[in-house]
Amino acid sequence: MIKLDWDNFSHKKMIHKVEEIKLFGFVKQITVYSSPSLNGYHCVILSFYPLVKRAIHQYRYDFEDDKNRLLLDMLSDNQKVRNVLFDYKIKTKFGKSMKFERKELFKYKRTTNLSEWQKIPKGSIKNYKQELLQ
């Protein structure tokens, strides 16, 4: 699994990067979320086969993952703190705490590395499974 944090990405740049990722043969699924800080996107990439750590790091670099995250992951020996994306962020302003959650925007999925990509809009995984069974 490759997790990307795209801070300060425009919507257009995010779409362009997803289209670029779809060209790689190892990619099985791409899920894009709005980041909880509301200043970018999170992208989670699943592959058809396991990737070695070195390859994951190189893909994260090539796919423009947050450079600070890459550096921290290189320097950390603790597996639990590497390649972490947070599901929510809590901000306190004027004595009031607010919780910002990441939201799934869309997902691309394919069954083999030669099959066509299928876009699955947010919340339609159940419908997608039903379509496959018909």
Image: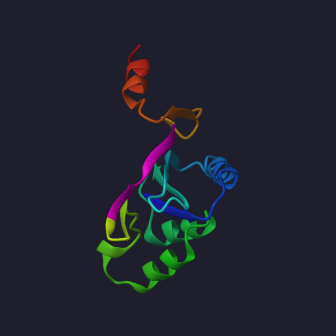
* Rendered-image quadrant of the C terminus: top left
Image quadrant where one finds the N terminus = bottom left
What residue lies at 67% left-to-right and 51% top-to-bottom? 20
Decide: is 55 above or below 77.
Answer: above
Q: Is residue 39 magenta?
A: no
Closer to the camera, 27 or 33? Answer: 33
Q: Is residue 48 visible?
A: no
Magenta region, main secondary structure: strand
Image coordinates for residue 4, horizontal then vertical, percent: 51, 62
Q: Quadrant of residue 113?
A: top right
The image quadrant that residue 130 belongs to is top left
Q: Residue 33: x percent and y percent?
A: 48, 50
Q: In the image, what residue occupies the spot 55% across and 71% down?
A: 66
Give the residue at x 61% y 66%: 64
Q: Residue 8's spot in the image, x, y percent?
A: 61, 65
Q: Residue furthest bottom?
A: 75
Left or right: 78 in relation to 20: left
Q: Where is residue 63? Give x, y as percent.
A: 61, 62
Q: Which residues are magenta?
A: 97-109
